[in-house]
Image (cartoon, rainbow, N blue to C red):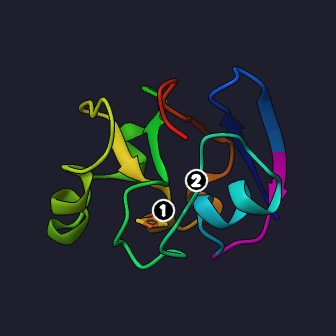
């Protein structure tokens, strides 16, 4: 298990213990985090799982793949630290990760 904090679009911090290999999106949906609709179920085809990666984590999480980057064009209020949360897989390396749901999303 690793730690993951997701801050919902209502400013509530969800502090979760999650499985290695699970996606940030899966954990958001399972825990009812507001603002993550994940309409496509994790296929990188909807952009409703958009999150901002906390500044201290952007380097470790890394850049989006080209397909994800294309889909991010459909997300709201995209920033340099935007990622699709279904494309972030939790691992020991990301233990303690913090992401935030954009205020206007969902
Ligand atoms: Fe659809 Fe992530 S759940 S792009």
Quadrant of the image occupied by residue 100: top right
- Taking 94 as reference, is 50 left or right? left
Picture layout, residue 60 above or below residue 103: below
- Taking 55 as reference, is 68 left or right? left
Q: Are marks 1 and 2 in contact (CB under 8 Å)?
A: yes
- At 77% across and 70% down in the image, what residue appears? 19
Q: Quadrant of the C terminus?
A: top right
Whichever of callouts 1 and 2 sits on the residue coming sooner in the sequence is 1
Q: Which mark is residue 94?
A: 2
Q: Quadrant of the N terminus?
A: bottom right
Picture layout, residue 69 above or below residue 73: below
- At 60% across and 58% down in the image, what residue appears? 24
- State yes or no: residue 19 in magenta: yes
- At 67% across and 67% down in the image, what residue appears? 26
In the image, ligand 1 is in what quadrant? bottom left
- State yes or no: residue 28 in magenta: no
Residue 41: image location, x then y, percent: 55, 76
Q: Which residue is mark 1?
A: 88
Part of the protein shown in magenta: 16-21
């Amino acid at each position: 298990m690793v730690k993951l904090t997701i801050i919902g679009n209502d400013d509530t911090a969800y502090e979760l213990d999650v499985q290695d290999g699970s996606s940030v999106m899966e954990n958001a949906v399972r825990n009812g985090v507001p603002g993550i609709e994940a309409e496509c179920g994790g296929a990188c085809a909807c952009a409703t799982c958009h999150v901002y990666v906390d500044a201290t984590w952007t380097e470790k999480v890394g850049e989006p793949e080209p397909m994800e980057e294309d889909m991010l064009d459909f997300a709201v209020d995209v920033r340099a630290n935007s990622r699709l949360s279904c494309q972030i897989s939790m691992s020991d390396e990301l233990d303690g990760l913090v992401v935030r749901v954009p205020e206007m999303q969902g």
